[in-house]
Amino acid sequence: MAKTHIGTSVPKEKEIKHYIFDCLGTADGYEIGWLHEKDDNNISDPDSELFYDKYGMMDVAKELILEGHDFTNYWLDEEDIEEWEAERDKCEECDGEGTIISPTYDDPYNEEPCPECACGHDI
């Protein structure tokens, strides 16, 4: 089942696009990956749109996800997608840990909630 994802971290000056991670069946029973924009229903550049295995397509898809673009996935493994989304959404201040080290006179390793994302993590 396809799952549509909405990107969150595309810089404002960059246009958000919606990509489709799709596949095409061949006459001999194989699948070829097809990565295209949402409204593009024809293969315009086979060299950059078609992939003979998932691993070839994964690098390009990961880059698009990390850039924050929207996408619908029909072909790639959902576990990989979730991992890339977590990497994309990870707080840069605390590296996704939910706390930062804020040294005090008494404790040079004093942990405090991250001011950027403390409400989103269990500490």
Image (cartoon, rainbow, N blue to C red):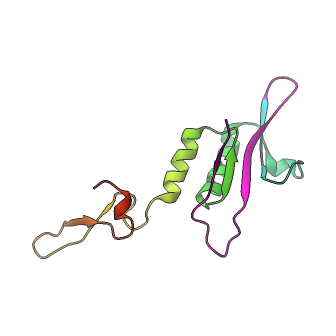
Residue nearer the viewer, 13 or 6: 6
Q: Is residue 89 left or right of residue 65?
A: left
Residue name at image x 45 percent, y 59 percent: 90
Residue nearer the viewer, 55 or 78: 78
- Give the quarter of the image for residue 112: bottom left
Residue 60 at x, y percent in the picture:
68, 51
Residue 109 at x, y percent in the picture:
19, 66
Residue 91 at x, y percent in the picture:
43, 63
Q: Is residue 82 left or right of residue 24?
A: left
Residue name at image x 80 percent, y 49 percent: 49
Q: Quadrant of the N terminus?
A: top right
Q: Is residue 34 above or below residue 30?
A: below
Residue name at image x 35 percent, y 56 percent: 121
Q: Quadrant of the C terminus?
A: bottom left
Chief secondary structure of the magenta portion: loop
Span colored in magenta:
1-30
Q: Residue furthest left?
A: 106
Q: Is residue 32 left or right of residue 120?
A: right
Residue 55 lies in the magenta-colored region: no
Residue nearer the viewer, 64 or 59: 64
Residue 8 at x, y percent in the picture:
57, 62
Q: Is residue 41 above or below residue 104?
A: above
Residue 4 lies in the magenta-colored region: yes
